[in-house]
Image (spheres, rainbow, N blue to C red):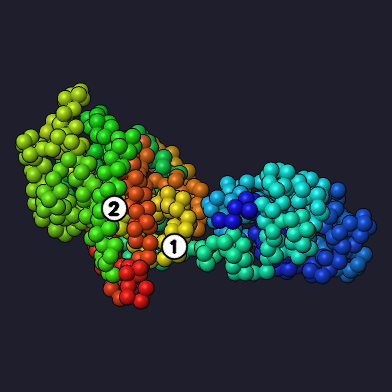
Amino acid sequence: MDTAIAMIWFDFGGVLSPPIDKLFEIYHKKSGIKPEQLKNAMSNVAQTMSMPMLAPIENAVITQEQWGKLLRDSLRKLYPNLDTSKAKLEAFGEQWFENIMPNETMVLLFKQLKFFGYKVGILTNNVIEWESHWRSMIQLDEYVDVIVDSCKFGCRKPDRKIFEIAQKLTNTKAQENLLIDDVQENCEAASKMGWKSIQFITNKQVFSEITRTLKYPKNTFMDTLPYITDIPQYDCKQSYKLISQCKNDKPEIIEILSGHQVYHITQYDDVKAILSSKDCVRKPTNKIGGASILPTLTPDELLLNLDGDEHKRMKQFAMKEYALTNLSSCKQDMQEIITKHLLSVSKSEKFDLFVVLDSIVLEINAKLLGLDCKVYEATLKPLSKTIQLADSKHTDKLIQDFTQMYDFILEFLQNTQSLKTEGIIAKFIKNKNATNPHLSDKELCGLLLGSILGGYQNILTFISKMLYALLYFPQFYNLLLVKRNLCENMLCEFLRLTNLGTTSTFPRITTANIRLSKCEIPKDSVVYADVLLANRDPLVFANPTQINPFRLNNKQHLQFGRGAHSCMGQHLLQLESLLILNAILDILPHIQLDSSIAIKWDSGVILHRPQSIPVINQSKTPNT
């Protein structure tokens, strides 16, 4: 990074907004006033005050209403036959900005520069009464460090004074500032101050110049962002059937796997409320004839997110070991395991990254639990995958595998001689009598099944899907190589966008009337609070299926649930995923997808993921 540049300023009109000439054309369609007519009237008003064209209102010498009246009078004198009845000149800003979209490409660049560590500001000649319109249009309030608006300081570009004010507000020297502006005169004024400047002509030209000016590798800054839906099979067909669409503010009705027709809740705020509510419970669904997304019943003690004091007691007991402070003490072990497996393929020209990830996640979970890795791989690995890939048409095989895994773990717990002295299992057994009442072997078995299925298969699914997507869109992988502090935000974005299987939640029963944003759900109703669609709610996440690591609000995702039903292993998944991602960037910086190999996908109620991630290690290919 060029350390001389600390502050990057964007002009609003013509840079963050569409081109000024285009705005005049749009206003012509709204008002009936041609661009040259409007410009002539604006100049006429300004000339009577011995000022440049828009200076009277951009310097707040007169109000918008006063300026609009003068503008109307000027139009009548200059063009006596012109119909101005459609023009809201006295409330000009409201009509001017109506239905105007920002220059999304420059807005994206603004966000990228912010995440690249620069301070970013808006240096604009603007109008007091227009502020709410243009700021809501570009939606950069969460990103912008400072706004210098001419109307608030009584001076405007290209006046020297406004650049001096900008420097003073940001405590910067002239050479630390860079201006992006569409007006040549403004860029020349900035250069005379000792600033660097880029005159905006096209989006592509600005991206090219900003990369060169800031001395980043070519194509570091992206002018477009792809969509998760552009990746074939990344999203799978959901397992429910649509019965009726939303009508008269009543939610959609769907049929879930058990055959029950339930309320389908998809808005972010509503889903969050249901996940957090004590009046929306899961336990009544896990019984014969209950509303379920699973192909068969599951023993209560295996569903840690059920309701009731006994499950609260189990979960509180288990979550102590999965707290971030405890996991952090295992960080060094995780890093050593990850590094070992990645180095084993680092000299290969081609390999299957999924196989490597599988080995890493399995060994980490075996280490955490205190299980022998060979036993885990030989017995628990195939059984856990079968369970997570459950097929509703083959429940007999599922029950058989589930019972075998359950019996294996129960026998393992009771055979203390084969137990390692370190690991979560040993701690569970040692402390099982610390709860009131004491934990039974069946409850311990349930905790371990959750740890094996979630800590291995679910984490593997998420990591493999995220890395597949990053390689499918290599611009993202290359971006992380240049700007590593984006890894955590990229991780959050994929947590928001990624669904593990063909369902995104467990159904719940309302034990009281539940008031949602547009309706009330009656007591004793079944609700399906769709986390996947809530995480893609356009009212919360702009362009919701776009992969945008520059969002500031993607940490608000609901991937891990809320309240009593929040995921026990969320800290493990985030820590492990981040360690693996950073290690791959370190050890395998030049990998790319092998497009000659077709990707097949595993798909079941719980899991949906690629069966393989074939990659080419470009640093080891003969032509390198």
Circle 1 Cα neighbour tier, 10 Å, few/some/many (<14 / 14–19 / ≥20): some
Q: Position of residue 296 (x, y in %)?
A: 17, 49
Q: Amino acid at mark 2?
A: Thr
Helix, strand, or loop for circle 2? helix
Q: Amino acid at mark 1?
A: Asn
Q: Position of residue 379 (x, y in %)?
A: 11, 51
**Displayed quadrant of residue 415:** top left
Q: Is residue 488 visible?
A: yes
Residue at image x 50%, y 54%? 550
* In-image side of 337 versus 534 (left or right): left
User: Looking at this view, is 606 or 141 the one in front?
Assistant: 141
Relative to 135, residue 414 above or below: above
Instruction: State the separation of the CA atoms marked 2 and 1.
Output: 20 Å
User: Looking at this view, is 360 or 342 the one in front?
Assistant: 342
**Displayed quadrant of residue 42:** bottom right
Residue at image x 21%, y 49%? 363
Relative to 352, residue 574 above or below: above
User: Mark on residue 478?
Assistant: 1
